[in-house]
Image (cartoon, rainbow, N blue to C red):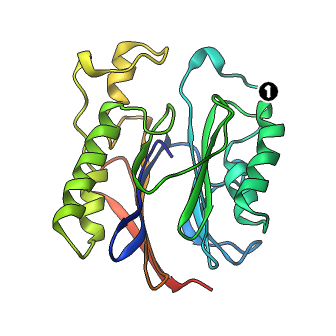
Amino acid sequence: MCLIIWAIDSHPDYSLILAANRDEYYQRPALPASYWEDCPHVLAGRDLEKLGTWLGITRTGRLAAITNYRDPALTRKDVRSRGELVSEYLCSYVSPETYLQKVKMQDGLYNGFNLLVGEKDSLYYYSNIERDIKKVLPGIHGLSNHLLDTPWPKVIKAKRSIREYLDRNKQVEPDFLFQVLSDNQVASLNQLPRTGVNRQWEQFLSSIFIAGSEYGTRSSTVLLIDRQKQVSFYERTYNGESEDYRQVAYEFSLN
C-alpha cells in the first residue's frame, strides 16, 4: 500500500473504517482479493511474484497492512519482500505485540516499511525506521510512504475528507471512500516532501490516485467493521485509470 487512511473507534456505528490505495508497477503480477487456498481464513489480494500481500483480514478479525518507506539512499537489493510481513501475520495466531517483537528482531532483512497489525478494533504500528512498537490510539490516522501521520499533502487531504464525511453521516457509504481514493490531483511544488527522488517524480507520486504509463494505483480497498462485528470488504483493481476497474465485495461476521 502507498496510502492508508483509517478511523478507529471514531464513529458510533463502526469500530474501524479503512480506505487504502496500493501503488505498484503494472508489470508486477497480482491477484484480486479472495480467500487463500493455503490459508483459507485469510481474505487478501496476492502478489504473484513473492506470494505476500499488502492488506488483508481474517475471518476472526486479524488485520494487517503495509506501506513502503521512501528513501532511495536506504534502498538495498539483497532484501526480503515486505509483503511477507503481512501474510505471515495473517496466517499466524500470535498476538500483535508478540508478532511485532519478532519483526523487530529481524527488521534489517527488509527495506524501509510501515506495518499495521491488529485484532478487530485494536491496531499496532511498527516501522523499521523508528523501531518503536506503538498501539494506535482512537482517531483518524494516515500513513503513506513516511511515518505514521506524517502530514504529506495526500495524507492531510484524505484524512480531512473522511473526517468531514464522518461528522455529517451516520451511514458510511463505500462509494464515498472510493471517491476519496480516486483523487488524482497532484500537490503543488511548494507542498512536496523531500524524500530523495527528483521533484518531477515527487510530484507525480503526490496524488492520492496515481496514473502513470508504467506505475500507478493498482487497487483500492475499503474495509468496514461495525459495532456488531460485521465486516464489509470491497476492493477495486484498476487498469491504469480510476474509471476502469473490477470490483469484488465480501461480507462476513467475525468469529
Quadrant position of residue 207: top left
Q: Please tell me whether mark 1 sits on a helix, a strand or a loop.
A: loop
**Residue at image x 65%, y 19%?**
74
Q: Is residue 107 left or right of residue 151?
A: right
Question: In the rendered image, which quarter contains the C terminus?
Answer: bottom right
**Residue at image x 42%, y 32%?**
150
Residue 103 placement (x, y as % from top left): 77, 44
Q: Is residue 176 left or right of residue 193?
A: left
User: Label 1: how many residues lie within 10 Å, few (<14), some (14-19) or many (20+)?
Assistant: few
Above or below 77: residue 121? below
Residue that extends furthest to the left in the rendered view of this protein:
168
Residue 115 placement (x, y as % from top left): 61, 46
Residue highlighted by disc 1:
78
Q: Nearer the viewer, residue 194 or 250?
A: 194
> Is residue 115 visible in the rendered structure shown here?
yes
Above or below 194: residue 121? below
**Residue at image x 44%, y 57%?**
138
Above or below 16: residue 211? above
> Is residue 44 visible in the rendered structure shown here?
no
**Residue at image x 58%, y 18%?**
72
